[in-house]
Image: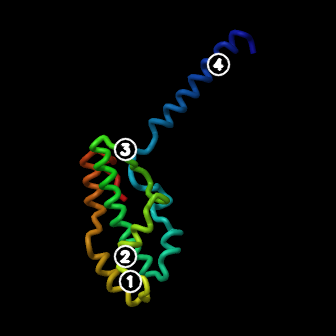
Amino acid sequence: MTMKTKRLALPFAALVALTAFAGTASAAEPANFGCGYEGSEDKSELDARASNYSLRQILEEYRFRWDAAYARAQCKAFSEGKPYQISCLRGRRDWDAIAAMVPNELWGMSRQDAKPFLNKLKAEDDGYSAAMTYCRELGAIPKKWNR
């Protein structure tokens, strides 16, 4: 390599590196509360806290409610110019608070005994869709993103 070629190679390498970095930055996903293809649940937390399948599903229903309240609060902070965090919720949920939402009498119930309560919860609005609509309206998350 001649001296002239070496002088041209260094700026060219820097340009390639900057172009690659700029492409990565512009291709970044817009902020949202999802976790991509991995899903957003905290499987280990659910498994550790729920003694049967119905209770696990009940805990998941309360997780949706907690997620909705958390997302709404973060989007409100975004709109007010306060510190906020809009990103994947896995590993960041307050599982003690979520578990506290479950009525005490359900914790010891069998799968069959808990099923009617689960069915009732599933029929109710968990507030998540409304929270996402609120966040979209504020511009905190993209218009086309959902769960």
* Residue under the point 49% across and 65% down: 42
Residue at image point 25% right, 59% down: 130
Q: Position of residue 132 (x, y in %)?
A: 30, 56
**Above-or-below relation of 116 to 126:** below
Mark 3 and mark 2 lie on one chain; the one further toward the N terminus is 3
The reply to whether dot 2 and dot 1 touch (C-beta < 8 Å) is yes
Q: Against 52, is 144 above or below?
A: above
Looking at the rendered structure, the number of numbered marks drawn on it comes to 4
Residue picked out by circle 3:
83
Q: Dot 1 corresponds to which residue?
A: 106
Q: Of label 2 and label 4, which has the lower sequence position?
A: 4
Q: Are marks 2 and 4 in contact (CB under 8 Å)?
A: no
Residue drawn at the location 37% of the way across and 47% of the way down: 84
Which residue is the site of mark 2? 102
* Nearer the camera: disc 4 or disc 3: 3
Residue occupied by mark 4: 10
Q: CA distance from mark 2 to mark 4?
A: 62 Å
> What residue appears at the point 44 percent right and 77 percent down from the top-left corner?
56
Marks 2 and 1 sit apart, C-alpha to C-alpha, by 7 Å
Q: Where, by quadrant of the figure, is residue 100 drawn?
A: bottom left
Task: Tell me which amino acid carries mark 1.
Answer: Leu
Q: Nearer the viewer, residue 11 or 130?
A: 130
Crowd tier of the residue under label 2, counting other residues whose Cα lies within 10 Å: few below 14, some 14–19, many 20 or above: some
From mark 4 to mark 3, how far is it between C-alphas?
41 Å
